[in-house]
Amino acid sequence: MFLRVIGRPLLARVKQTTGIVGLDVVPNARQVLIELYNKTLKEVEAIPADEGYRKAVEHFTRQRLKVCEEEEDWEVIEKRLACGQVEELIEEARDELTLIGKMIEWDPWGVPDDYECEVIENDAPVPKHVPLHRPGPLPEDFYKTLESLQESSTRTPPPPVSPPAATSSESLSKE
């Protein structure tokens, strides 16, 4: 019993290298991740609750935090999250904190509902190496179909059609 309680932390594998140039081993990666994820959840609260960015960040951060709190071993954390090494996760978490600060500064969700964006058409010649992203004209049939659909949506729907009666091969051959 004594060896299980005391010996297990001592027998834990120590990571020697990440195998990624410039990415050093973080011996206390689990604790660093838990701190970063808690900080991320606190800072993302400054973003409106109904914004997709906040919902996404909260979702994956809570999921990753839960795994880090449940597991002690860095290998198990990496395996359960399947998002790379713990050192890579630390870099991602730091980058996410930086992005949260920038998103708060940029305030992309602060556009008023009645805001109208001005579209500027520029007919300047496009250099040959830049692809043109202007679709060609649509076929006439497209506009006819669109017009008929718009007209039919304003009319009352036709009554349901009953399936045609079964015909034999003889009646088909007579016609």
Image (cartoon, rainbow, N blue to C red):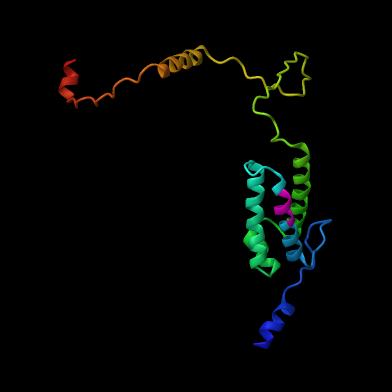
Q: Is residue 6 above or below residue 153?
A: below
Q: Is residue 132 magenta?
A: no
Q: Nearer the viewer, residue 147 or 123?
A: 147
In this rendering, the count of numbered labels is 0
Q: Position of residue 54 (x, y in %)?
A: 66, 45
Quarter that holds the C terminus: top left
User: What span is colored magenta in the figure?
Assistant: 39-44
Residue at the location (72% across, 75% down)? 12
The chief SS type of the magenta part is helix
Q: Position of residue 166 (x, y in %)?
A: 19, 27
Residue at the location (64% across, 44% down)? 49
Q: Nearer the viewer, residue 164 or 9?
A: 9
Q: Is residue 67 above or below residue 161?
A: below
Residue at the location (69% across, 36% down)? 109
Quarter that holds the N terminus: bottom right
Q: Position of residue 128 (x, y in %)?
A: 77, 20
Q: Nearer the viewer, residue 169 or 133?
A: 133
| Drawn side of residue 168 relative to residue 23, left or right | left
Residue at the location (67% across, 54% down)? 61
